[in-house]
Amino acid sequence: MALINEHFLKLPGNYLFQDIAKRVKAYKVSHPKKRVISLGIGDVTRPLCPAVIEAMHKAVEEMATQATFRGYGPERGYDFLREAIIKNDYLTRGVHLDKDEIFVNDGAKSDTGNIQEIVRWDNNIGVTDPIYPVYIDSNVMIGRAGVFENGKWSNVAYMPCTAENDFVPQIPDHRVDMIYLCYPNNPTGTVLRKEELRKWVNYALRNDSIIFYDAAYEAYIQDEDIPHSIYEIRGARKVAIEFRSYSKTAGFTGVRCGYTVVPKELTASTIDGRRIALNQIWDRRQSTKFNGTSYISQRAAEAIYTPEGKEQVKATIAYYMENACIMRTELTKLGFQVFGGENAPYLWVKTPNNTPSWKFFEEMLYGASVVCTPGVGFGPSGEGYVRLTSFGEREDCIEAMKRIKEWIG
Ligand SMILES: *Cc1c(COP(=O)(O)O)cnc(C)c1O
């Protein structure tokens, strides 16, 4: 008899976006004349830039002739892309990486979810709260998270990030084996300064922990002194794995390409005390379970690093960041407490008078026909906040702010 992996049954349904859709639908049915504007979209909306399109067309043409056709590619990714990554994403920030430390993938979700396979099942986990749900759920699936009680997993250390602590997670007072950090943060849109990130690296060095650093929104950083990579911190190569993605950087959510950095200096212990390089383990895992990212997607990603590609990608990000700036300015004027939105495409807004997230969601939907994402959907510390995204159309952003003003006024 085949028995199922019952850890899957422990997962509470991830109904956040279905719930939102259901409530929006109910509103639309009772208000057929109102045009609803969504500031809840978690996906990019601007098209791929011309440099990327051109590279993809060219790659398709290559696939069409015998002489230039490509089948399976190298598992870690093509050299042309890994070299462009090292040169443009890291050398420019003073970080020297070797080609074999870069693993090209089909996006950051896969690897942030899969990475936990390479550590023992009984390691414990630390996460910032609120959080991108993939980190916890992937650990639940193999039984590492413990049991779910009162909105929390018993074997997960939650590090609250709220207005009270300026969204800086406190270093745990006990040992945590695996720590997930995401900066710039989804959902709060906040960043971590170098001094703060250094504390985490030092904590990991002292406790022999591993940091999984999700830098999917790195391209949105505007302030000079905010680190783009955890490897800008001394010692991080010994303790951190970094995830990058072209999804939010260049609109690749439908193309699929990203990469993971596993430094060769990063080791973890066996139960009898031998140190093993995780680069070698991750390589073994990937070559068994992953057969590479499509050639076309990798050529598309390479095009982002050309002078034209860089210009065009920057312009798209500037468009989203201008949306963020408009929303931030208007909402602040209206008296809202607004966080994020300066180095990230997300705004994290405190609900007035501690209104619960879902209640505020309903009030704004019925009062202004504007959709947000209830913060509590990202974890217990998200209660009393909502997330707004800057991924929409400019006119919609402006119109939404006008409506919120009328509603509040
Ligand atoms: C969108 C997002 C990703 C990237 O996902 P892809 O699989 O690369 O599309 C990773 N981490 C966070 C926190 C995200 O919001």
Image: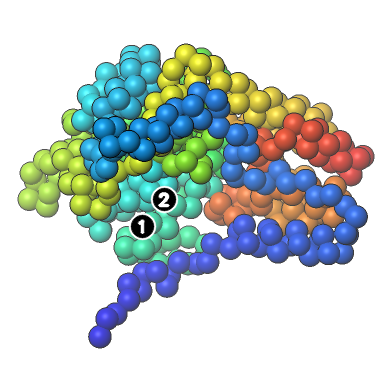
Q: Quadrant of residue 341?
A: top right
Q: Residue at x 7, y 44 (%)?
A: 274
- Which residue is disc 1 drawn over? 139
Q: Residue at x 27, y 49 (%)?
A: 290
Q: Nearer the viewer, residue 3 or 223?
A: 3
Q: Amino acid at mark 1?
A: Asn
Q: Nearer the viewer, residue 199 or 29?
A: 29
The image shows residue 86, relative to residue 374, as above or below, that is: above
Q: Residues within 10 Å of mark 1 (few under 14, many from 20)?
A: many
267 sits left or right of 260 in the view: left
297 sits left or right of 282 in the view: right
x, y percentage for residue 327?
74, 32
- Which residue is disc 2 drawn over? 135
154 sits left or right of 367 in the view: left
| Ligand 1 is within 8 Å of the C-beta of the residue at disc 2 | no
The disc at residue 201 is none
Residue 184 makes an appearance in the image: no
Q: Quadrant of residue 76?
A: top left
Looking at this rendering, what residue extends furthest in the bottom direction? 1
Q: Nearer the viewer, residue 251 or 65?
A: 65
| Image quadrant in which the C terminus is located | top right
Residue 123 makes an appearance in the image: yes
Q: Secondary structure at mark 1?
A: helix
Q: Residue at x 70, y 29 (%)?
A: 323
x, y percentage for residue 62?
35, 32
